[in-house]
Image (cartoon, grey):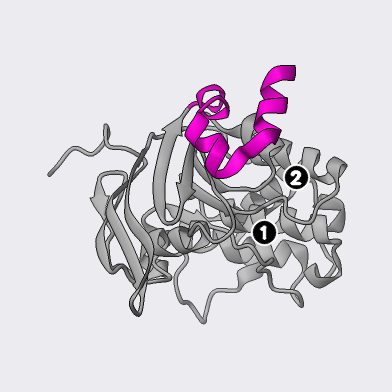
């Protein structure tokens, strides 16, 4: 049996995706270390969400390979990829609005605890699922909102709940797509601390437009432009990279670096 303990958390090999004759992802090569927080940034239309869809199995590849912790997951269905330890959120909040906040989280923990399709075991009797769900509710600071329908939460609370659902299955590779989009400054600050807490010891891959969030959270940053990674480096080096400034960060990066 192959030892994959030293393999990257995620490895993309010549990833390509075309829609008809239009190439969107053009030969992406990327290695993300286990346990690192890695941000993917780029201008609108760069292909960031498409890249997430390819990694998580939502879109089929046109060419290339996706490796998760040393295992080739190319071509697997999203649920199969999830069961191998990768979980993701979406740009648009994706929760069960009529279920309670607690029930949303509990749905996320069942499979990871070994519960499969069972019609004779009452879900209310599953103590380990209840305790795990309650632990996550505490982490995301929604214990007080436990029993209300998730659709009644504020927007920021719904985003927190979605992060909770994303980590509920115990995945050790977590992908978050624009987790702070539409939030106020104070809500964003809270979300950053929440993400930092729930991703501790895990591999985090985040797509985010807010450069403050990116530079605060990321160990390394990859810049995607026209479907290609033009740079991967530490936040400090990305900030001062002339090609990145020209392609994406622009004068704002110059101003930030002058005042850093």
Of the pair 210 and 147, the residue shown nearer to us = 210
| Quadrant in the picture for the C terminus | top right
| Residue situated in front as seen by the camera: 229 or 71 | 229
What's the distance in space between the residues labelled 2 and 1, CA to CA? 14 Å
137 and 234: which one is in front?
234
Q: Residue, x 33% and y 77% (percent of image)?
A: 21
Q: Main secondary structure of the magenta part?
A: helix
Tell me the SS state at disc 1. helix
Write down the residue under mark 1: 162
**What range of the chain is rendered magenta?**
234-260
Q: Position of residue 232 (x, y in %)?
A: 42, 34
Report whether 139 appears left or right of 244.
Answer: right
Where residue 138 is drawn, which disc sits there? 2
Q: Is residue 259 magenta?
A: yes
Q: Residue 164 at what x, y percent from top left? A: 66, 53
Relative to the observer, which residue lies in front, 149 or 235? Answer: 235
Q: Residue at x 52, y 51 (%)?
A: 175
């Amino acid at each position: 049996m192959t030892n994959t303990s030293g393999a990257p958390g995620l490895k993309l090999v010549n990833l390509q995706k075309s829609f008809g004759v239009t190439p969107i992802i053009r030969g992406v090569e990327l290695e993300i270390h286990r346990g690192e927080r890695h941000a993917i940034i780029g201008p609108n239309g760069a292909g960031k969400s498409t890249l997430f869809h390819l990694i998580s199995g939502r879109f089929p590849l046109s060419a290339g390979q996706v490796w998760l912790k040393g295992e080739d997951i190319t071509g697997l269905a999203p649920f199969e990829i999830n069961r191998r330890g990768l979980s993701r959120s979406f740009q648009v909040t994706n929760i069960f609005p009529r279920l309670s906040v607690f029930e949303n989280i509990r749905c996320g923990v069942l499979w990871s605890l070994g519960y499969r399709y069972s019609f004779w075991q009452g879900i209310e009797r599953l103590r380990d699922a209840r305790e795990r769900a309650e632990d996550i509710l505490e982490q995301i600071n929604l214990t007080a909102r436990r029993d209300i329908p998730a659709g009644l939460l504020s927007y920021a609370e719904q985003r927190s709940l979605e992060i909770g659902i994303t980590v509920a299955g115990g995945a050790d590779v977590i992908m978050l797509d624009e987790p702070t989009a539409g939030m106020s400054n104070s809500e964003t600050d809270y979300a950053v601390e929440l993400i930092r807490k729930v991703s501790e010891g895990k591999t985090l891959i985040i797509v985010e437009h807010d450069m403050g969030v990116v530079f605060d959270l990321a160990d390394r940053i990859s810049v995607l432009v026209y479907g290609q990674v033009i740079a991967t480096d530490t936040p400090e080096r990305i900030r001062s990279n002339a090609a990145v400034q020209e392609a994406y960060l622009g004068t704002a990066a110059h101003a930030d670096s002058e005042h850093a």
